[in-house]
Amino acid sequence: MTDLPKHRVNMIKPFLHTGVDYTGHLWVLRGGERVKMYILVFTCLEVRSVHLELIEDMSVHSFLMALIRFSNIYGIPSHIYSGNAKSFVAGCDMIHEVIASSEFREKLGTCQIKHVKIPVHSPWYAGVWERLIKTIKSCLYKLIGRASHDYFDLLTIISDVQNAINDRPLTYRIHLTQVWK
């Protein structure tokens, strides 16, 4: 196994290096009918914390709006790692165009967000966030199964799942009383 990259072992602000990916669709009740919605998963590559956004579709506009909401809470990431989905590539290209435009250069010129796409046909490269997606899906399956919920109920359930995942310990903790026995 090779050495871990510097951004994965240094003490820095959470979500500075962020991986993004979508989960499969969920059925949401809206106006008496069932519609598909998706969860966009933001994963911190340092502390393996997650932020979940419920979005209507996998379009560039939905991705950019979710990224803005994420940045308003956690700050602007310096690196965004993603798969090669069209919405991620187009969304990050649009961010670079907006930052380069003259009207936003002064305000957003210091952001310098770098988009890193994983190599094509290399699913192991995204193992950090793919494993967390499996955890999210198993939590959701235990909570809702195949049932459909309305938007706000599902938003609350997703918030509970996010809280449960972020509160888990990353390693085993040994108490001093166990060491001295």
Image (cartoon, rainbow, N blue to C red):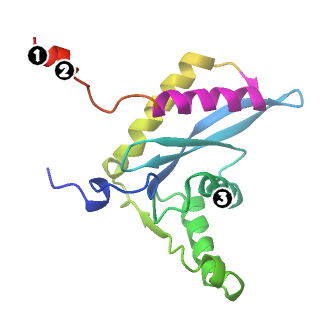
Question: Residue 53: percent from the left, percent from the top?
Answer: 63, 43
Which label was assigned to residue 68? 3
Element assignment for label 1 = loop
**Residues in magenta?**
148-166
Q: Is residue 17 above or below residue 123?
A: below
Element assignment for label 3 = helix
Q: Residue furthest left?
A: 181
Q: Residue at x 61, y 78 (%)?
A: 99
* Residue nearer the viewer, 120 or 12: 12
Q: Residue furthest right?
A: 31
Element assignment for label 2 = helix
Kind of residue at disc 1:
Trp
Q: Quadrant of residue 60?
A: bottom right
* Residue nearer the viewer, 105 or 179: 179
C-alpha gap between disc 3 and disc 2 = 44 Å
Cβ–Cβ under 8 Å for marks 1 and 2: yes
Kind of residue at disc 2:
Leu
Are there few (<14), some (14-19), or many (20+) residues within 10 Å of tag 2? few
Q: Which residue is mark 2?
A: 176
Q: Which residue is mark 1?
A: 180
Left/right placement of residue 167 relative to residue 10 reads right
Q: Residue at x 26, y 53 (%)?
A: 9
Q: Is residue 37 above or below residue 118?
A: above
Question: Residue 151: percent from the left, percent from the top?
Answer: 77, 32
Q: Is residue 145 visible from the viewing direction of this image?
A: no
Q: Residue at x 62, y 32 (%)?
A: 159
